[in-house]
Amino acid sequence: MNASYQLGAVTVDPVRRRARVEFAIRNDSRETWRPAEGFRIGYHLFDADTGTLITDGARAVPPGDVKPGESAPVSVDLELPAEEGRYQVLFSPLREGECWYYERGWPFLLVEGQTADGIWRSGRTRVATGGLLRRERVLRALARAFSYPLLTIWRNRGLIRTMVRRDVLGRYRGSFAGIFWTVINPLLLMLTYFFVFGIVLQARFGGDQSRSSFALYFLAGMLPWLAFSEAAGRSASVLVEHRNFIKKLVFAVETLPLNLVAAGLVSEFFAIVLFCAFLVAARGNVPLTVAWLPLLLVPQILFTAGVSWFLAALGVFLRDLGQIIGFLLTLWFFVTPICYPESSLPADLLPVFSKNPIYVLVRGYRAVLLENRAPDWEALWKLWVLSAAVFILGHAWFYKLRKSFADVI
C-alpha cells in the first residue's frame, strides 16, 4: 500500500449540481510528498458503463510536505454531470507533468453515483484499485452480453408477436390458399427433395430400405433445417426492406431478425404437426422421447437468432450478401446428411462435418422422433455452448453496428 484514505464527508448541492468531497490521505510510501515538486491530489470523472474519461478535475495542494506515515486533509469541489448516466469519481495523488499514481497501481478513493431525472444520487464511496475496476468492468460487460439479448426479447415480446403475425398473414394475403401456404410451401419443398433422393436416386437410411422409412428420416432432418434456413436466408435483407422503420421511427430494430426466427418457428410447428401425423400413420404412435425436443429447440433458436443478427447487420453494408447467403445455404444443406445417410459422407471428412450444428440438430431430431432414444449428450452440451456463444456474439455484433444503420441505409 502506498496510500490510504479516511473519508470525511460528501456534501452534494443538487440544484447547482456541485459536490464537495472531504477526506484525509495518509502517506504509506517511503517518499515524502512535496507540493514544491508538483505533488497534488486530483480527480478524474469517468462514465461508469464505458470507462470513458469525462473530466480531468481540479487539484488540491497539501498544506505542506507529507512525510511517510503522516496524513493530510483534502477538500475538493467538483461539478456533477447533468447528462443521465452512472459515473465514477477517482481521487488519487499525482505529480504534475509526470503521472497519476492510480495508473501505477496505487489505491484511490472512489465515489460512485448517477444522474437521473436531472438529480444526482450518490452511491458507494470506497477505496479501490485499477485492477479491481477492470475486473468489475469485465464482469459487467459479460453480464450485459448475456442479459441484453434476453431483455431485448422480453421487452419487445408484444412487438415481435405483432410483427410475426403480420409477416405470416401478409406474406400470402390475397392468394387462394392464404395462410395455408405456410404449410404448403415447406411440404412441396420436402416432396421435391423426397422425389429426387428417395425415388430417383434411391437413397435409403439404415437397414430399412423402404420408401416410408426414408421419408420419415428425411422429413425429420428437414424440420430444423426449414426453420433455420428461412430465418438465415431472409435476414441479410431484412433491415433494407424495413428501412423506413430505421430512418424515420424510434424502433427496436434488433427485433427485425427475431421476427424472422419466430416466423420460421411457426412454419416448423406446422411441419412437426404434419410429421407426427405421418408418424402415426406409418408406425401407429409418436414415441415418448419426443419430450426431449425442447432440449433441441432451445439451442436451435439461440443459434438461428445469433446468425440472423449477424447477417442482418452485415447485410446493411454488403448488399450482395442476400445472393451470397442463398448459395451458402444451398451448400450447407448438401453437406448436412439430411437427404442422404451419414454413411455416404467421406470417412476422413466425417469428424469435420460432425461439428456442423445443423448436423447435430438433425441427428437429435431423428433420435427423439424416430429412434425412441434421447439425443447424444456429448454433442448436445457442445451445441448448447456453441449456440449460446453465437447468440451473444451475434447480438453484440448487431448492437455495435446499429448506430451506423441510418447513415448507410
Image (tube, grey):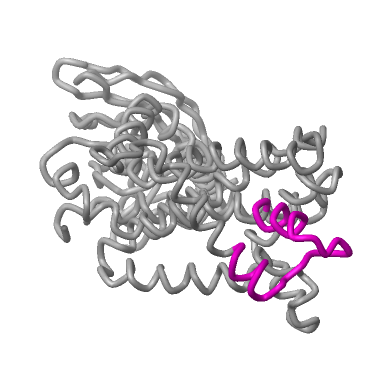
Instruction: Let me know if residue 202 is in the magenta part.
Output: yes
From the viewer's side, name the closer residue of 202 and 241.
Answer: 202
- Which x, y percent locates residue 195? 59, 65
Q: What count of labels does the image hold?
A: 0
Pinpoint residue 238: horizontal percent, then vertical percent: 29, 52
Q: What stretch is highlighted in magenta?
A: 194-220
Q: Can residue 307 be seen in this view?
A: yes
Quarter of the image with the C terminus is: bottom left
Pick the residue in front: 89 or 107.
89
Residue drawn 80% across the image and 60% down it: 210
The percent position of residue 3, horizontal first and vertical second, equals 52, 42
Q: Is residue 338 above or below residue 405?
A: below
Residue at image position (86%, 44%) is: 373
Tell me the quarter of the picture where residue 252 sits.
top left
In-image side of 201 versus 393 (left or right)? right
| Residue sitting nearer the eye, 293 or 152 | 293
**293 within the magenta span:** no
- Taking 214 as reference, is 340 above or below it? below
Magenta portion: prevailing SS class: helix
